Image: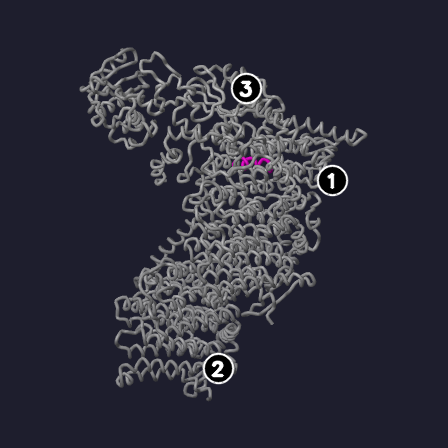
């Protein structure tokens, strides 16, 4: 199988998204299984690509339409992209299985189509090598995310979606202006070439472009002031979609921001922007944790917690060192696993007991022992207890930050994670040690298996983190040293503005 | 298990020369006790020491009329005292009821309830008379006739019968529980 | 051979200590009587009391701990006695450590309290509580006094302190140790159970506190223990503060030891007299007054002594 | 190959997980006991190997960190404490543990402690510290949420302080393992002596020392940070508390020693010293002194049996801190000796408390009383434990206290000496309060049928009591071990005797002469008249007849006069301070969320505008 | 004199009572039984701070009890005797308690109840035994018609010892 098959990663969801109405006409019930099959095939391809990239060691470059990069749009699937495409595919597959059971609202085919478009957008954002193409894929993800948030047709859902649209719209428009500035000054849209020519942009233009780009993507990547939409959107969206939001949609936004910042490394504004992102990230962590302290709705509490964790990753990337970047990537992977598990479990509880407020969670240990166990393991690993996966990435990140001398920032973050420990422990205590009426619920087998699989993954990474750590280091290397990135992309020699 | 007869005279001398008093100052004789301890009469010359704990006392002074309620306490204190114990009663009231011969609340014959070794005459004897009584009891110890405690032990049934006749059967338990109903409800509040 | 010799010496010390202890108790009663302008009992009165108590024909017990507490108290006092250097005679002189002896002199109170409490008598409970608080109160000045001694002489062995005092003169001649001696003397007042601080065995109030349940032979053993304790405490005080006694002027060692015993006896009676005079004059403190008193003046004096000794 | 250090560390965790999975009454107890016994056996077997080679090492690489483990004399002593008391506590738990949840986390905390003692680099030290804290927290969470939250927050605060300190050191030194960190600090000390510029500035050193002090202070329960201990020790399975207070508090003490090992010389030269003690050590010693007094006094005023022993174990740790603080070789050795004796008698005490609660079901003093006749074995053990804790000569408590007294007073430290003496009296005081309230006095009618201790608990208590007596009579055994740590012979003297030059203590002579004294007293006793056993109702209460229904004892509020004299000081309490901080943070969080995420879109739009203005100011 | 002024002042406030001055520092009032509570209230206002005793006099021939409330005023240093008369029969000898005005009255009322059988409503410790032992609890021994000698003979079983006409008295 030659490497060009990798382009199927983009093509498959696109084609199948438009196939969905056809399937619908054949039979209404076939839509959801079709979605599951497509996501399964996507996972297969992604696994094959991951295998290729990590054994081969060389990234896969796909030229759309055979044109050489500076002219044509190219997909650059490096170590990072391979890893994340696999995560998106796997999360998508699990959520597809979960949505088979949990989506009750009627137009299921619309849901399936949006689901696939969301996956397409995210995969595209991560693997594209062209800045404008990045904008296009970001728009696809954003719009399908708006639609999915409003999918439940309740007042709360529509309000959440409206907030998301307003902020997302403004953000992406600023992002477009930023791209225009860069294209204006450099004449090229290809990321590799931008990195090459980044030296000779005049400083003010570079600073303005960088600021606008970061500001545009920050909305998607949920940094402090711009993540106001996130709690309502997470809470209102259907459960599988929330899991996908926190698992990869946010991370794709963050990846894009970080990729662009690192590309424009040679400009003078680089250090300034890094410090800005650092400050924003720290404030996100602190505000995210504090506001989750007195939450009565567990789903909203998890939303705040995932915002805070994303802020933590942003801090990781903004350190500007190789160790910081690899810790950030490792944290992304761990966070994806844990948050997918948590939102899956919360969704399942909401499905069975009809709500996600603390009262429903009282005495969950007796009613739904498996789900309660899953949530407990997830909570414990998020707090950062050794022998669980998030601990390793947290400690790497803290040490990387302290290496750079950011003691104040780390003190704030550790204080915030102390607060996080409080509300997670309150949840664990309510689940296991508070008595509640209501009889034992028979738990669905497939979801149980998925949850146990994720729990096993958490504990395995927790106890033997070496494998995951090497992957994260390779992925971060791909993201961090831009010179290697430029060499990999076969640019046409002569073409330049 | 050791035969102390050889040392008996020493023990008698020690018992005579160090009488510790449990002064149960009932009735009007109590006021006669302090002068005995002060510098004019000074019983400490004879090695006598006032001592509130019956466990280590020998001489049990009953210094006035004895009401049934006090008699209950006297009997209990008497039984708490270790063995060679002597009782000395002051005044005529313990003898035959004295001026309270017809009062319902005074005991007529103390001797019926506990064995009395020495009774000092006088409706409240003066300290000199008490000193004389003490000398009398010292002589009796020396001669070995101060055997009140032996008499109590030998014919315990007689004394017991008199006591139960006056107070009714099982009076100790009844007396102990007498105040509990009122104390108990206060206990619930705290 | 060595064992018999130490056994003989131990017996000698024990008999001498008990006899002198009883004489001290006699002296206390006579001197207090004379202060009250009374004739007072003969000097051998405590011995008579003990014989009378031991010869009681019947005795009661409240359980194993009730008896073991008393026996343990006397045993601990005898143990303490063996450590304090008594002129040339003492046996465990080399191991006579300041802190060890201070602890050993406090342990009999633990034994008595264990026995008293096991009797279940509420008076005994109250007495035990007050004895504990008095102990807590005297510990601070006592601690500072011992610290002052330890720092001043640099060593903790009483024997070396006695030797040092032979050359440097009595320790109360130097200021820090004078302060320590004053504080320690006030503490002795409570350890003897004398008037101002004998709230724990207040006869009228809680009918002799812990002693309420001790009858015949138990009280006899306690009398013996009190005698030996009196002797040991005064001996300890005279050793560490009043220079002890090491006389080698005479030819034969027997006369030397006799001379040392006489000198020690004089010093001990001096200490005793001070305690008796204070005892005869002052009324009894309540327990929190005693605690506040001890935590104020004696502690300041002893702390000053300790700090001066440390410089 | 699995090195024996790994077995020692992970055997309890493995047993815990197995016990949790096979949740069958018989099997899980067996597995747990094996889990606790295996490390103990290996440690004893390691004693021979340590005689020949200086230490046993092992290292593995895990996610970019190189973890090293070492077993040398100091860590062997601490590991043995953990082994013995841990084994006894596990034996105790056989009869008091309710379900497998407790087994899992008790054994996990034992693994954590082993890991902490055997760790040779900062990261593994931190990781096992976290495991130990988490496991012990889960034990408390099952019983009471508020207490467990308070405990978890304080200890995680300490752990994060340590993490920051480790981070700072890692940033400057570049490596984690103790040897290289120690070497760098030593060179740094030399440089500062020569006057040239040093790697760590003065306030950086202050920060690192402060952070380490808070981290280990929390775990050891020093004065301002001790508030979690009474609740945590009382709100969990009582025989686990034997391990909790006996062993886990030693981790805090071991931490203090780590400060000495790593930063000792550097801090000494940086901050100079008062008399013989280094200034930074004097801080630890002074805190320890205050802990003794505060812990002791509060213990005397408690109404709950578990709280009393919790405060008492805090005050005993104060002794160890004073020993460590003074900083001379003798005082550190005395401190470790007291750590051993504290583990022994405190473990024994908590097992006794476990038996009492297991049998009577009561924890307040006012419902207990007169148990001495009903539980003679437990009372005998309690008697030994009381003698040992109060520091009565023939037992180990006195030997270690005596060493600390000698070491501190010899360094000319009057204030500390005074505090120590006051502490020993307080120990005496609250023990008698416990004895009077629980063992003596009139027995409430519902306690009449209490049986004695169950077999496993009795065996556990027996082991600890025996060790208490043996180490008391022959203190030289332990002194020999301690001298090996420092290499040179600090405490001379034979197996029976401790000889410090300026003070000698001989356990054997004291026991002999005590026995002689007791024999003399016994002879006098048996010469007297035959004894008649008398019930409690036959006592002299002013002649009134006595009934068992209404018992006249001052079991409640035993030390009312003390409470009155200390009324002024009791008003200040750090517990309320931390409570207020906690609720203040929560209110702040509530108002913050209310204003920022207030839910209307216009506000969010304004946020965007705000960001734009910032970017503009940024210099676009 | 001073006492006269006090008596007039009180009588003005309590018309239902008569009062006179017996001698220097001693006044006397007679009050009907049902008005005793408000009279004591007025006394309290007129600075009669202490209640010394409630004594009961048993007029057998009139068939009445006379309750005497003895009060003492510290400011005026005068002693007031408040007399009331109540029927003697046990079931009718009932009085309202004055415990709320003078707390000390509680014990005096129990004392009166023990020995004379006067029942004071409102005093919750009425059933609590006060001084008398269990045997004499219900006998109210201080009543005039109580046969003391007969009871003593029965109680102490010394029947032969006394000669009724008291001329040969055998110990």
- Residue that sits furthest to the right in the current view: C251
Secondary-structure class at tag 1: helix
Q: Which residue carries the number 2 mark?
A: A51
Taking D137 as reference, is D388 left or right?
right
**Dominant secondary structure (helix, strand or loop) of the stretch shown in magenta:** helix
Residue A251 magenta-highlighted: no
Q: Which residue carries the number 1 mark?
A: C4
Vertical arrangement, residue D488 with respect to residue A326, above or below: above
Residue C190 horizontal/vertical position (percent): 56, 31
The picture quadrant where one finds residue A358 is bottom left
The picture quadrant where one finds residue C234 is top right
Residue A50 horizontal/vertical position (percent): 47, 80
Q: Which residue carries the number 3 mark?
A: B43
Between residues C31 and A461, which one lies in front from this camera angle?
C31
Residue C53: mark in rendering: none
Task: Identify the subunit bearing mark 2.
Answer: A
């Amino acid at each position: 199988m030659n490497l060009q098959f990798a382009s199927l990663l983009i093509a498959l969801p696109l084609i199948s998204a438009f196939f969905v109405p056809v399937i619908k006409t054949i039979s209404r019930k076939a839509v959801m299984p079709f979605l599951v099959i497509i996501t399964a095939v996507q996972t297969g391809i992604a696994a094959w690509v991951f295998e290729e990239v990590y054994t081969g060691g060389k990234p896969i470059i796909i030229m759309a339409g055979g044109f050489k990069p500076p002219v044509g749009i190219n997909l650059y699937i490096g170590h990072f992209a391979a890893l994340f495409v696999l995560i998106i595919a796997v999360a998508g597959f699990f959520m597809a299985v979960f949505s088979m059971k949990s989506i009750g609202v009627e137009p299921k085919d619309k849901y399936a189509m949006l689901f696939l478009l969301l996956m397409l957008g995210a995969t595209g954002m991560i693997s594209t090598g062209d800045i404008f193409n990045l904008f296009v894929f970001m728009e696809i993800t954003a719009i399908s995310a708006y639609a999915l948030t409003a999918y439940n047709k309740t007042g709360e859902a529509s309000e959440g979606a409206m907030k998301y649209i307003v902020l997302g719209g403004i953000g992406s428009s600023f992002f477009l202006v930023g791209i225009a500035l860069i294209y204006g000054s450099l004449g090229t849209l290809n990321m590799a070439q931008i990195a090459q020519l980044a030296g000779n942009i005049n400083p003010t233009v570079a600073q303005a472009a960088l600021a606008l780009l970061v500001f545009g993507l920050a909305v998607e990547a949920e940094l402090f002031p711009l993540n106001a939409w996130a709690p309502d959107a997470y809470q209102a969206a259907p459960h599988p979609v929330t899991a996908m939001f926190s698992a990869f949609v946010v991370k794709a936004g963050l990846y894009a921001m970080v990729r662009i910042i690192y590309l424009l490394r040679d400009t003078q504004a680089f250090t300034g922007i890094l410090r800005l992102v650092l400050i924003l990230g720290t404030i996100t962590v602190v505000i995210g944790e504090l506001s989750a302290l007195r939450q009565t709705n567990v789903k909203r509490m998890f939303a705040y917690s995932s915002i805070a964790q994303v802020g933590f990753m942003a801090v990781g990337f903004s350190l500007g060192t190789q160790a910081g970047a690899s810790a950030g990537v490792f944290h992304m992977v761990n966070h994806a696993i844990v948050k997918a598990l948590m939102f899956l479990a919360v969704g399942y509880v909401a499905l069975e007991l009809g709500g996600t407020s603390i009262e429903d969670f009282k005495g969950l240990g007796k009613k739904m022992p498996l789900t309660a166990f899953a949530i407990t393991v997830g909570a414990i690993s998020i707090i950062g207890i050794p022998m669980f996966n998030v601990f390793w990435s947290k400690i790497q990140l803290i040490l990387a930050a302290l290496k750079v001398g950011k003691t104040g920032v780390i003190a704030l973050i550790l204080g915030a994670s102390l607060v996080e420990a409080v509300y997670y422990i309150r949840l664990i205590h309510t689940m296991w040690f508070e008595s509640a009426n209501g009889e034992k619920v028979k738990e669905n087998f497939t979801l149980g298996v998925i949850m146990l699989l994720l729990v096993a993954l958490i504990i395995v990474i927790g106890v033997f983190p070496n494998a995951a750590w090497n992957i994260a280091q390779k992925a971060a290397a791909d993201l961090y040293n831009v010179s290697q990135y430029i060499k990999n992309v076969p640019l046409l020699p002569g073409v330049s503005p | 298990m050791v035969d102390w007869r050889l040392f008996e005279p020493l023990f008698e001398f020690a018992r005579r020369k160090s009488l510790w008093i449990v002064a149960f100052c009932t009735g009007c004789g109590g006021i006669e006790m302090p002068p005995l301890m002060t510098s004019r009469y000074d019983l400490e010359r004879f090695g006598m020491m006032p001592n509130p704990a019956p466990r280590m006392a020998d001489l049990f002074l009953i210094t006035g009329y004895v009401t049934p309620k006090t008699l209950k306490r006297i009997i209990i204190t008497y039984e708490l005292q270790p063995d060679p114990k002597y009782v000395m009663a002051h005044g005529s009231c313990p003898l035959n009821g004295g001026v309270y011969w017809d009062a319902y609340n005074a005991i007529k014959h103390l001797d019926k309830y506990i064995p009395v070794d020495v009774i000092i005459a006088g409706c409240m004897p003066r300290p000199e008379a008490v000193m004389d009584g003490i000398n009398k009891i010292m002589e009796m110890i020396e001669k070995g006739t101060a055997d009140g405690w032996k008499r109590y032990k030998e014919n315990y049934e007689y004394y017991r019968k008199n006591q139960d006749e006056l107070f009714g059967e099982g009076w100790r338990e009844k007396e102990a529980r007498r105040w509990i109903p009122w104390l108990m409800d206060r206990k619930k509040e705290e | 051979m060595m064992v018999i010799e130490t056994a003989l010496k131990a017996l000698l010390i024990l008999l001498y200590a008990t006899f002198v202890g009883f004489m001290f108790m006699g002296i206390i009663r006579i001197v207090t009587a004379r202060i009250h302008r009374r004739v007072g009992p003969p000097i051998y009165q405590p011995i008579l009391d003990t014989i009378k108590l031991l010869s009681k024909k019947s005795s009661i017990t409240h359980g194993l701990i009730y008896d073991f507490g008393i026996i343990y108290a006397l045993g601990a006092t005898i143990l303490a006695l063996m450590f304090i250097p008594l002129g040339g005679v003492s046996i465990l002189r080399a191991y006579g450590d300041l802190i060890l002896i201070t602890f050993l002199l406090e342990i009999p109170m633990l034994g008595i309290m264990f026995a008293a409490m096991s009797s279940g008598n509420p008076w005994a409970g109250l007495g035990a509580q007050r004895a504990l608080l008095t102990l807590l109160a005297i510990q601070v000045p006592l601690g500072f006094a011992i610290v002052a001694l330890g720092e001043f002489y640099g060593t903790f062995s009483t024997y070396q302190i006695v030797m040092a005092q032979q050359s440097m003169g009595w320790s109360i001649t130097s200021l820090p140790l004078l302060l320590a001696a004053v504080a320690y003397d006030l503490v002795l007042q409570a350890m003897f159970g004398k008037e101002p601080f004998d709230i724990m065995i207040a006869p009228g109030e809680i009918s002799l506190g812990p002693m309420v349940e001790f009858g015949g032979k138990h009280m006899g053993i306690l009398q013996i223990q009190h005698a030996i304790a009196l002797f040991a405490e005064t001996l300890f005080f005279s050793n560490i503060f009043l220079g002890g006694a090491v006389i080698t002027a005479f030819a034969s060692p027997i006369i030397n030891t006799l001379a040392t015993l006489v000198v020690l006896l004089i010093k001990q009676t001096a200490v005793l007299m001070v305690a008796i005079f204070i005892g005869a004059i002052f009324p009894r403190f309540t327990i929190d007054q005693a605690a506040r008193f001890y935590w104020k003046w004696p502690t300041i004096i002893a702390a000053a002594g300790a700090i001066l000794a440390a410089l | 190959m699995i090195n024996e250090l790994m077995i020692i560390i992970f055997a309890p965790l493995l047993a815990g997980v197995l016990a949790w999975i096979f949740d069958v009454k018989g099997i899980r107890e067996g597995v747990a006991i094996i889990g606790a016994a295996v490390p103990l056996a290996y440690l004893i077997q390691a004693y021979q190997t340590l005689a020949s080679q200086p230490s046993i090492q092992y290292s593995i690489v895990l996610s970019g960190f190189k973890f090293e483990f070492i077993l040398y004399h100091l860590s062997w002593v601490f590991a043995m404490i953990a082994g013995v008391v841990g084994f006894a506590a596990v034996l105790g738990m056989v009869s008091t543990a309710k379900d497998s949840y407790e087994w899992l986390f008790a054994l996990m905390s034992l693994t954590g402690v082993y890991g902490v003692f055997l760790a040779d680099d900062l990261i593994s030290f931190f990781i096992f510290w976290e495991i130990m804290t988490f496991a012990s927290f889960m034990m408390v969470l099952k019983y009471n949420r508020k207490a467990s939250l308070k405990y978890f927050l304080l200890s995680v605060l300490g752990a994060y302080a340590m993490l920051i300190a480790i981070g700072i050191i890692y940033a400057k030194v570049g490596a984690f393992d103790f040897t290289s960190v120690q070497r760098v600090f030593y060179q740094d000390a030399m440089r500062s002596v020569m006057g040239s510029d040093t790697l760590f500035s003065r306030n950086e050193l202050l920060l690192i020392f402060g952070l380490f002090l808070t981290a280990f202070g929390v775990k050891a329960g020093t004065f301002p940070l001790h508030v979690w201990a009474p609740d945590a020790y009382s709100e969990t399975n009582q025989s686990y508390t034997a391990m909790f207070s006996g062993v886990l508090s030693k981790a805090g003490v071991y931490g203090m020693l780590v400060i000495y090992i790593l930063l000792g010389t550097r801090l000494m030269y940086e901050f100079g010293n008062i008399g013989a003690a280094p200034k930074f050590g004097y801080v630890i010693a002074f805190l320890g002194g205050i802990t003794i007094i505060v812990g002791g006094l509060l213990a005397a005023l408690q109404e709950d049996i578990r709280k009393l022993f919790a405060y008492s174990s805090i005050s005993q740790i104060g002794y160890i801190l004073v020993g460590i603080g003074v900083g001379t070789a003798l005082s550190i050795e005395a401190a470790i000796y007291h750590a051993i004796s504290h583990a022994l008698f405190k473990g024994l005490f908590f097992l006794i408390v476990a038996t009492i609660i297991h049998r009577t079901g009561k924890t307040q003093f006012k419902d207990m009383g007169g148990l001495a006749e009903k539980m003679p074995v437990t009372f005998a053990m309690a008697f030994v434990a009381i003698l040992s804790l109060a520091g009565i000569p023939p037992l180990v408590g006195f030997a270690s206290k005596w060493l600390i007294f000698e070491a501190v007073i010899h360094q000319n430290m009057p204030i500390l000496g005074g505090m120590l003496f006051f502490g020993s009296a307080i120990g005496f005081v609250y023990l008698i309060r416990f004895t009077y309230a629980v063992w003596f006095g009139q027995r409430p009618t519902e306690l009449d049928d209490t049986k004695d201790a169950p077999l496993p608990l009795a065996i556990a208590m027996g082991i600890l009591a025996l060790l208490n007596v043996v180490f008391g009579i022959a203190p030289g055994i332990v002194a020999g071990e301690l001298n090996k740590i420092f290499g040179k012979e600090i405490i001379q003297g034979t197996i029976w005797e401790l000889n410090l030059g300026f003070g000698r203590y001989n356990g054997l002579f004291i026991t002999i002469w005590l026995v002689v004294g007791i024999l003399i007293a016994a002879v006098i006793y048996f010469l007297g008249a035959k004894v008649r056993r008398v019930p409690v109702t036959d006592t002299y209460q002013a002649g009134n007849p006595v009934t068992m229904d209404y018992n006249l004892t001052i079991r409640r509020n035993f030390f009312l006069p003390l409470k009155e004299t200390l009324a002024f000081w009791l008003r200040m309490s750090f517990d309320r301070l931390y409570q207020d901080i906690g609720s203040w943070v929560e209110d702040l969080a509530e108002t913050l969320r209310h204003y920022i995420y207030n839910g209307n879109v216009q506000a969010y739009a304004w946020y965007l505008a705000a960001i734009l203005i910032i970017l503009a100011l940024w210099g676009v | 004199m001073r006492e006269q002024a006090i008596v007039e002042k009180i009588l003005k406030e309590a018309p239902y009572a008569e009062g006179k001055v017996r001698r220097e520092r001693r006044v006397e009032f007679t009050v009907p039984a049902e008005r005793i509570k408000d009279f004591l209230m007025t006394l309290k206002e007129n600075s009669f701070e202490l209640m010394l005793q409630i004594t009961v006099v048993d007029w057998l021939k009139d068939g009445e009890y006379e309750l005497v409330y003895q009060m003492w005023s510290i400011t005026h240093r005068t002693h007031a005797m408040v007399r009331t008369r109540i029927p003697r029969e046990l079931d009718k000898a009932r009085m309202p308690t004055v415990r709320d005005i003078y707390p000390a009255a509680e014990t005096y009322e129990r004392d009166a109840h023990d020995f004379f059988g006067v029942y004071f409503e409102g005093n919750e410790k009425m059933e609590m035994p006060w001084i008398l032992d269990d045997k004499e609890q219900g006998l109210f021994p201080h009543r005039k018609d109580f046969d003391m000698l007969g009871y003593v003979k029965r109680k102490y079983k010394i029947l032969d010892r006394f000669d009724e006409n008291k001329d040969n008295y055998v110990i």
